[in-house]
Image (tube, rainbow, N blue to C red):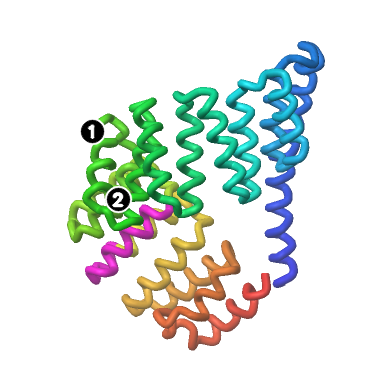
Amino acid sequence: MRNYLKMLHNYRVMTENKIIELQLLGALALAKRNHESHGIKDIRSIMDMASVYVELEDYDNAEKMYMKALELNPDEADAYCGLAVIFVNCKDYHQAIEYYKKAIDINPCNERAYFSLAETYDKMKLYDEAISCYKKAVEINADDYWAYINLGEIYEKLDKDKEALEITQKAIDNGFDYYKTHFTMGVILNKLKRTDEAIGMYVKAIEENPNYIPSFLNLSDIYKSKELFEKAVDILSFGIKHNKKEAALYYSRACIYVHLDIIKKALNDLKMAARHNPGLVWDMERDYELFPVKKLDAYKVIKNLYSTL
């Protein structure tokens, strides 16, 4: 049974990946035909091929295409941005930064380059540099919604909650009234002990995007901290209704059921969590909160079935 489940899981992943790969190969074939019909000096088709190679994770050919584009036009800023993406994906952030800077040198108003450079600095935990670049992106394009959101998240990580609140509120005031804005506001307000307002923001985030799992998890954690366990179960159940394969929701609901002493339901949720993400068995084994469930023979069956998948 265990081998069958593992084989089924691997087959599903392989099938999904194969479909994506076939679509990308089709796009590559189209880009090659366009290149042949427009001639070897057609930069647009070269750039298209490079982009598809990046998606296929064929970085050698992608780099060759971008370099070919730069041979034809040394001021092709998008080619430098494309090269930077390759090196970001390969985790060579220093080289990526150099390419983003070259794109900016060519076009100082290149919002995409500033935004991506900020993301790269963020990955390196160079938050001051990231903040500076996000601010520049917003200066170039005041409608850059994600720059506001990412700025707010960096300020929140740095415990600069006042700045985080201001920039995220500014995003909302400017009409960027989206789920991620409300989610970020929820995180900040909860840190500031403005719990009721945080709850309202998480509720809005869920209404706008019921497929963003952290909204459910954070809201249920607030209810759990207030010992409003039934409300926590309700919000996690609503999340599961919209995300039936999300293991983290089942796991979190299992923990709440333990607090409510509904052990049978907790056990069933742990089974569902392990089925959708066998790696969670490792967490279950180390989670003291789940002790009332783990002492059951039925839990040991789940552990033995999924622990090696």
Percent of width and height locating residue 89: 62, 46
Nearer to us: label 2 or label 1: 1
In magenta segment, residue 192: no
Q: From the viewer's perspective, tell me whether residue 18 is left or right of residue 93.
A: right
Q: Nearer the viewer, residue 160 or 264?
A: 160
Residue, far top: 38
Magenta residues? 213-231
**Residue at 32% from the left image edge and 53% from the top image edge:** 156
Q: How crowded is mark 2: few (under 14 residues within 10 Å), some or many (20 or more)?
A: many
Q: Do the residues labelled 2 and 1 touch (CB within 8 Å)?
A: no
Residue 226 magenta-drawn? yes
Q: Is residue 26 above or below residue 195?
A: above
Which amino acid lies under the numbered mark 2 shown in the image of this protein? Tyr
- Does the rendering let one see residue 40? yes
Residue 142 coordinates in the image, percent (x, y) = 33, 27
Q: Residue 88 location, x and y as percent?
A: 60, 45
- Residue type for callout 1: Asp
Q: Is residue 270 left or right of residue 87?
A: left
* Disc assigned to residue 20: none
Mark 2–mark 1 Cα distance, whole angstroms, equals 18 Å
Q: Where is residue 225 in the image (x, y as percent from the top left)?
A: 26, 69
- Secondary structure under the numbered disc 2 in the rendered image: helix
Chief secondary structure of the magenta portion: helix
For this rendering, which residue is in front, 47 or 251? Answer: 47
Dot 2 or dot 1: first in sequence order is: 1
**Pointer 2: what residue?**
202
Q: Give the quadrant of the N terminus.
A: bottom right
Toward which corner of the image does residue 196 lie, by quadrant? bottom left
In the shown orientation, is residue 58 left or right of residue 225? right
Q: Which mark is residue 173?
A: 1
Q: Residue at x 24, y 40 (%)?
A: 169
